[in-house]
Image (cartoon, coloured by chain):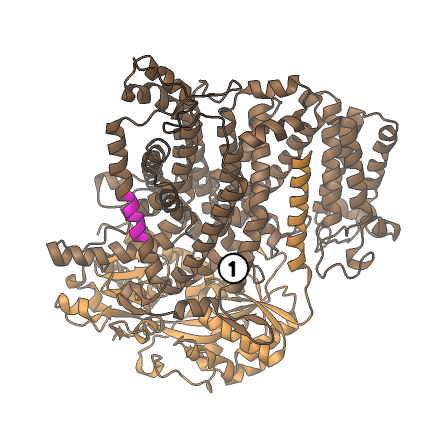
Amino acid sequence: MTSKRGFAVALFAGALAALVPGAARAQGQLTVYCSVQEEWCRPMMAAFERATGIRVAMTRKSSGETMTQIRAEATNPRGDVWWGGTGDPHMQAAEENLTLEYRSPRLAELHDWAVRQAQQANYRTVGIYAGALGYSYNVPELQRRRIEAPRCWADLIKPAFRGEVQVADPNTSGTAYTLLATIVQLMGEEPAFDYLKALHRNVNQYTRSGAAPARAAATGESVVGITFLHDAVTQKVNGAPVEIVAPCEGTGYEIGSMSIIRGARNLDNAKRFFDWALSAEAQAIGAEAKSYQLPSNRNAPIPPEAPRFENIKLIDYDFARWGSAAERTRLLTRWDREVRAAAR
Amino acid sequence: MGALSLARIALACAAFGLLIPPWYGLESGFASWPGGEAAPLAVLLAGGAAWWLWPVPLILLASAPSLLAHRAEGRLLIACGAGVIAWVFLQGWAIGLPGTVWSIAAPFVGDASQPALGWGATFLLTGAVGLLSAGLAAQGRFNGDAFVSFLVVGSAALLIAFVFAPLLTILSAAAVEDGRIAPEAMLARLTAHEAWSLACVTSSLGCGVVWNTLALATLTGVLSTLLGLAFALLSARANLHLGGAFRALAILPLITPPFVVSLSLIVLFGRTGMVTEALSALFGIPRSRWIYGLPGVLLAQLLAFTPIAYLLLEGAVRQIAPSLEEAASTMGARRFTVFRTVTWPLLRPGLAAAFLLGFVESLSDFGNPLVLGGDFDVLATRIFFAIAGARHDPGRAAALALLLLGLTFGAFALQTAWLGKRRYVTVTGKGDAGVPSPLPRGLAIACGAVAFPWMAFTAIVYAIIMLGAFVHDIGRSDMTFTWRHYITAFEVEWFQGLVFRGAAWDSLFTTIEVAAISAPLTAGLGILLAWLLARQAFPGRRTLEFLAMLSFAIPGTVVGVSYIMAFNVPPLELTGTSLILIICFVFRNLPVGVRGGIAALAQIDRSLDEASATMGGGAVATLRRVILPLMRPAIIAALAYSFVHAMTAVSAVIFLVSARHNLATVYIVGRVEAGEIALAIAYSSVLILIMLAVVLGIDKLVGRAQIGRRAPAGAMQTAPVPVTA
């Protein structure tokens, strides 16, 4: 009998141990799903705890994973606020009625692009930062090949860059989908797909993660990496020999967003966090955490390393149209069929 | 154990669950017990709440009189046990948290709502399972042994709840489109071009994911088995005295978190990697990107899975009774003939198990293809991105999961066909006094030629990992020494007591807790199941085996999403707790415990059981006195494997971690994603040290199996001189 009893004891002890940490659920707390880098998530939550005394439980996951989790938890939500991450999944969550409409009193302090995005989502999400799309190239590798420094989107389809461009797969990465939608808006759909087919010949690998090409360009694994500019800035600040390019034809951008999850268990605290996260002092934390996006509050200090929007030619990005599930599926299916499936 | 005593214990357990612990799941602790949120069912019923649960105590009461009168009436007990289980779940599904879920129940209960089942319900259900199995035993099933009956019914119930039901939940999604059932959509998904395309044969385009996955898994399975065999033969049969170092280096990859080996491979063989640069500078070999794709993933998987094959095969080699080989050489066979005709055939179950393990691990590996895959896609990553990618399509993911299941079952079928119905018993009750024959010289040289370079390679890969943790950025060859990464992760401060400031502490503590709880549970349940499957004959044995091995074939990503779908709403609400992590690990790692147990039992002769039974030992006594001591190696392997896998798993738990219970590996994946490779490597090195300590500790604590064998040459005082022909 001893072995069975021992097993039962172990089972019971295990059950008890599992019970204890989950048992205490104090008042005054908040669960945040965070979809930016860890270094930014942590000081953000710590600052909010200091400012309000509300205890924050934070999980960091990419925006795709968070979206999946929120969708799966829809009947019994666990999280209260979803903070950060590219705007498309936030728009999609708004479209699927997974998030709650909330008009923060601080909307007046925000840049126009943030307010416009909130309007398009019926105030179910709001912009907290923005980042423009572009690319970075490895200077020594470029010189070694004696290629002229690229300045435009059109430069990337030159034969000199054959097998030297890296970009993420739009099926898995919001960044790459932004590129797809940007090129379509910039050139019109048919020329855009001609361009993408030409680019395909130069692409050495479609990575899964959106920021990975910046790292590849930094280490020289690839000469050019197409990413959001702030990801490339992070590499450059860390000492990588890269140059950052905001393409001459104009480029698209993402709006990192924040939403309150429908059915949030701590709704009042969620709203307090929402208001606080839009304030200038909360948005100043990003720069300290080496995240060089542009904050959405007009009064928030802009990090000196951040690519300034006034120096970049931005297109008039239609987030509602290109963020919708139908349009996304159509574009991605066409990209899969005509670009990805083509020979190199 | 008799049916009567089991039924009485079960009834007491159910009564305890009824009267003492809180019936519903808790949001805020035991504070309000015995009233309020934490009330037991008895208090709820007495207060008029949850009146639809009245049948539960009534059914239980019906079984009591005959038990008190020292009679175990089979049919009655079965009806009571099954009745309670059925009623608890039916009412749980019908009346949920948001209100009445089944409209059919609405006229009776109105708009009632209830939270998820809690500890009271857990005890009550355990008792009900006990009653049911006592009833079956009383009817003469399982040879009337109530202990066996309880184990079978109990483990079947657990397997159905935590393996089969979640799987059904997600697979039903394969046949659903736009909220309705569409078989034609399912057919289209299963035969999709992305899965079956053969374009790579005729053009430069990639092939379908099924072919990619199959090619990778077959290569990994075959090569890891061969490498593992070389190591096993050298360590078990060649007098090399490399013991500890050999074992540690072979085990290192086993205890490495995923991604890390891949990162090291990129540092070495990437286009700007160290080896690549050196080859380019010295020999002018152009720098290419070959590592991204099949070769890179294969290399990473071999590094990761060869040790598993080695551990399995080493056990198998040691279990071969040397007297057979001795008999062969006595009769004049040369060393190589002995190996070919005796040792090799007896190794077949071990080889099959090792291949199968490598094959299936490769199928469900997710980390290495993610980092090194390049354009080479496999099913596991495709499924992950069908669920978590920019285009969310659970139906497509479920169909791809079905294909993956098909591949795994195919492998199992092949294994069965190859092993056939032969017997591989060599450890018998008669004892064995043979000396293992040394390896044939040619074979020993061949094994060494394969194993030692591989060991050197492994050592280099690990040196890179250790180095990477102490320098600024190994990926860009910035080799200035720094403690920075360790300080970020593991900073400790003395401020009115010890404060754990580092970013990694939370996840590290949770990981160790979860792994330490789930490992003994996995090993215990696994060995019990193995014993049931190998030694007991009962109807439904094949089904139970299928259920026990099923979770092996399900890729982690699918398990994660299916768990979150199945256990997020009452009656079983587990998401956001550490319990769901423990359960996930126990049932994911269970197959290895079972497999190892069955393999060990296949080599222990039944006559030992029979001897025990003849001398009056029941199932419990035989298990404890005879089987378990002989199965120590299998138990160690199961403990070590489940602990290590609980600390290194990623794909299943990436959806299950919550803000409060984060895991080390998920944290590391986040670091890798952010390009913080050095921090990831630093944290991984700490995990590696912890796991190494634990694995060696388990080994010391539980000890090696002592099978009575003569000491090998050298200690010859008692051994008779071998006759040379």
Amino acid beneath label 1: Leu
Left or right: A299, with A227 as reference point: right
Percent position (x, y) of residue A94? 53, 65
Residue drawn at the location 69% of the way across and 29% of the way down = B147
Question: Which residue is rendered at x = 33% and y = 34% of the image?
Answer: B239
Is residue B256 something that shows in the picture? yes
Magenta stretch, residue numbers: B454-461
Q: Position of residue B465 (x, y in %)?
A: 34, 57
For chain B, what colour was chosen? brown
Dot 1 falls on a residue whose secondary structure is helix
* Camera-side residue of B457 and B400: B457
Is residue B657 at all visible to an observer of this figure?
no
Residue B25, horizontal then vertical, whole percent: 71, 53
> What is the chain letter for disc 1?
B
Residue B315 painted magenta? no
Q: Quadrant of the N terminus of chain B?
A: top right
Residue B659, by quadrant, is: bottom right
Give the residue at mark 1.
Answer: B508
Q: Along the horizontal axis of the image, is A305 left or right of B553?
A: left
Q: Nearer the viewer, residue A204 or B390?
A: A204
**What type of secondary structure mainly makes up the magenta span?**
helix
- Quadrant that contains the C terminus of chain B: top left
**Residue B353 position within the rendered picture, expressed as x and y whole percent measured from the top left:** 42, 31
- Count of marks, rendered view: 1
Neighbours of disc 1 within 10 Å: few (<14), some (14-19), many (20+): many
Q: For the point 59% across and 21% down, which residue is it?
A: B609
Instruction: Identify which residue, B370 or A330, lies in the foreground.
Output: B370
Q: Which chain is orange?
A: A
Residue at the far front: name it: B717
Res B15 quadrant in image: top right
Would you say residue B457 sits in the magenta stretch? yes
Q: Which residue occupies the foreground of this view, B199 or B290?
A: B290
